[in-house]
Amino acid sequence: MPGAQHPRPAAPAANPNPTPPGAQPTTPAAPAAQNPHPAPPAIPRRPPAKPRPRPLPRSRATVLLIRYLSLKAPIMDLRLDRQRRLPAPPDGKANFVGWNADGPTPGEKGTAVAVGHLDTDTGPAVFAGLTEVKRGVLVEVRRADGRTAVYTVDAVRKYEKANFPNKEVYGPRGRPELRLITCGGDYNRRTGYSGNLVVFAHLKEIHEPDKHSRAH
């Protein structure tokens, strides 16, 4: 149409980052290549195993504790009978634990043996809860010199009296070990219990007198 004006084409948008004259245009940097075989995560090191405690010299046993059973009992010295077995304390001392006075003392090298009643005519006795003990339970035995020998339970076994393994229970060992013995099996009013329950344990650690006093 006469007199009509055509609009001018729009100017191209200005480049916010123009390339200077004579310079070569740059291309964006490629992302860093990832390692297709990354290093495995570091495996945490296990703490070094605790060294075995050294056996202790002789010192009389005074108190036995099994915190798992809330048991704390005084200890009296006993000696093997004619059958080479350790008898239980007298009936009047059903809450006492008997310790083999001729064997190793707490923490001493060898097999220490302690016995106690399961029950009496009047009710439960010192080792009434021994059937509940399991592997890993701690048995603490205080000594006259103030130290405490701490044993850890390895096994709990039942034997009929006719097949009681004297050598396995009382036999010597190359490290400090402990046996706790009480009655077990069926009960007969005339003959008593038919068997025994035996707890096998080995020395785990020693508590010195100062540590022991802080713990109590």
Image (spheres, helix red, strand yellow):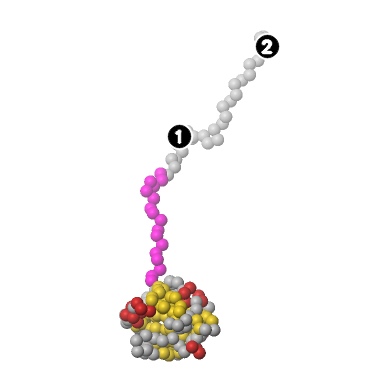
- Is 48 inside the magenta-drawn segment? yes
The x and y percentages for residue 30 are 43, 40
In this figure, which residue is indicated by the disc labeled 2? 3
**Is 116 placed above or below 13 here?**
below
**Of 154 and 121, the residue lying toward us:** 121
Q: Is residue 7 visible?
A: yes
The x and y percentages for residue 75 are 46, 87
Residue at 40% in and 80% down: 179
Q: Relative to 38, is 215 on the left or the right?
A: right
Q: Amino acid at mark 1?
A: Pro
**Is 76 placed above or below 49 here?**
below
For the record, the magenta segment spans: 33-49
Q: Quadrant of residue 33?
A: top left
Residue found at the very far right of the displayed protein: 3
Q: Earlier in the sequence, mark 2 or mark 1?
A: 2
In this figure, which residue is indicated by the disc labeled 1? 25
Mark 2 and mark 1: Cα distance apart in space: 45 Å
Q: Amino acid at mark 2?
A: Gly
- Is 186 inside the magenta-drawn segment? no
Q: Quadrant of the N terminus?
A: top right
Secondary structure of residue under mark 1: loop
